[in-house]
Amino acid sequence: MSMEYFGSRLKALRKSAGITQAQLASKLQLASGTISAYEQGLKYPSIEVLIKICDTLSTSSDYLLGITSDIPSQMELKGLTEEQIQPFLQLISIVEQYNNLKDTSTT
């Protein structure tokens, strides 16, 4: 299971949905600190919890795990062609890589 992008993508999806860590934790029946740990890459969910996260945030496990960079429906850039969206996807990837490097350098 690839977890390189999991935390940053989870955080982005949660914020895009307009919910707090505590609210997401409540929906998933988890402690809010667990969501924080997921977003920081300190802990990873079980398969069962991953499925619940995907259902709750209307996304795919492939996106959360970095297998695909397809933007989930709630984050789509409406009215743009695939060619126009590509630079945004590249920027997202660069930011995710930067955040991962920054996180590993502070530990």
Image (cartoon, rainbow, N blue to C red):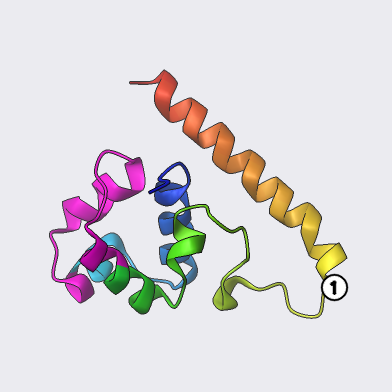
- 77 with respect to 95 (left or right): right
**Which segment is the magenta one?**
26-50
Residue 94 horizontal/vertical position (percent): 65, 39
User: Of helix, strand and loop, which mostly describes the magenta segment?
Assistant: helix
- 69 with respect to 28 (left or right): right
Residue 85 horizontal/vertical position (percent): 78, 63
Tell me which residue sits at (56%, 77%) in the image: 74
Residue bearing the label numbered 1? 81
Q: Amino acid at mark 1?
A: Thr
Residue 82 horizontal/vertical position (percent): 81, 69
- Along the line of sight, which residue is nearer the eye, 90 or 11? 90
Q: How many marks on residues?
A: 1
Tell me which residue sits at (58%, 59%) in the image: 68
Per the image, is 43 magenta? yes
On screen, 32 above or below 106?
below
- Along the line of sight, which residue is nearer the eye, 79 or 72? 72
- 86 with respect to 64 (left or right): right
Per the image, is 93 magenta? no
Residue 72 horizontal/vertical position (percent): 56, 71
Tell me which residue sits at (44%, 78%) in the image: 58
On screen, 87 above or below 105?
below
The image quarter containing residue 29 is: bottom left
Tell me which residue sits at (41%, 65%) in the image: 14
- Along the line of sight, which residue is nearer the eye, 57 or 68? 68
Query: Could you tell me which quadrant the C terminus lies in?
Result: top left
Instruction: Say which element carries label 1.
Output: loop
- Along the line of sight, which residue is nearer the eye, 72 or 46? 46
Mark 1 Cα within 10 Å, few/some/many (few <14, many 20+)?
few
